[in-house]
Image: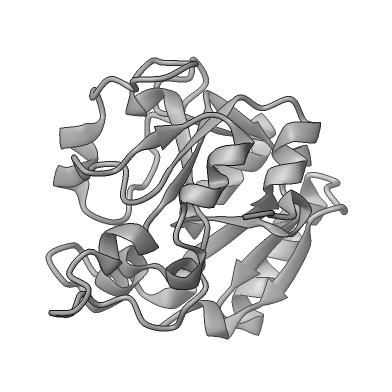
Amino acid sequence: MVLNISNIKLYRITHKDNLDDILTKGMLCSPNHKHANPNFKQIGDISLIQTRSNRAIPIKPYGCFKDYVSFYFCNKSPMLYEIQNGFKVTMVKPQDIIYFVTTIRRTKEEGCNYIFTDGHAAAISSQFFNVDEDLKNIDWNVINGQYWFDTAEDPDRKRRKQAEFLVYLQVPLSTIIGIGVFNNNIKNDVEALLQSYNINKIIVKVKEDYYY
């Protein structure tokens, strides 16, 4: 399978309250980074985050999950569904969630070290890779598809939908090509904050279709 890396986008969701600190530091930091925000507002399954946080990464550049900044290969992930609906996690309104968007090409251009998985990284059955050729092991039909709920015919679909791209230690803001938000009010707020830091190369767009 031949993939055009320049077309592969990466998506990271975070609470909008984390944006100011990210802009101050000029990067997205892993939890183990020396400049990590001690008041970082987590969203999602906190128990799962804690359970996997110190799990060892089996391939270079090694470390553990707390050494990485995680992205999905898709927007509108299963985790976002759970967050917006408060399904086994604390519910967060869509207007409080923003997307950082980049591409594999940009991470390479910025010299980031990365690995990726063929499914949710916490799942025992998921495989880890650090060679671009192995992107063929990701189920791109599921990644790009509308439906991801497990079925009797495909009881592993949700895991594969949540394939992850993990960047070692930090993601410079120069890597980010855009920020996706839920509505114009949040767009205006984010743009104003970017302008206060004299950041004009990150495009902010209302992407309501990124949300449930």
Compared to 122, does 163 lie above or below? below
Nearest the eye: 137 or 149? 137
Compared to 24, does 12 lie above or below? below
Compared to 77, does 201 lie above or below? above
Quadrant of the snapshot with the C terminus: bottom left
Q: From the top left corner, tell me how far across and down residue 175 is, in percent.
A: 74, 41
Direction from residue 133 to residue 85 in the image, left or right: left
Tally of numbered tags: 0
| Residue in the image at 33% along x and 48% along y | 42
| Residue in the image at 48% along x and 20% along y | 33
| Residue in the image at 17% along x and 62% along y | 89
Nearest the eye: 13 or 122? 122
Compared to 183, does 45 lie above or below? above
Q: From the top left corner, tell me how far across and down residue 82 is, in percent.
A: 25, 70
Direction from residue 29 to residue 50 in the image, left or right: left
Q: From the top left corner, tell me how far across and down residue 96 is, in percent.
A: 45, 68
Direction from residue 203 to residue 172 in the image, left or right: left
Q: From the top left corner, tell me how far across and down residue 131 is, in percent.
A: 58, 31
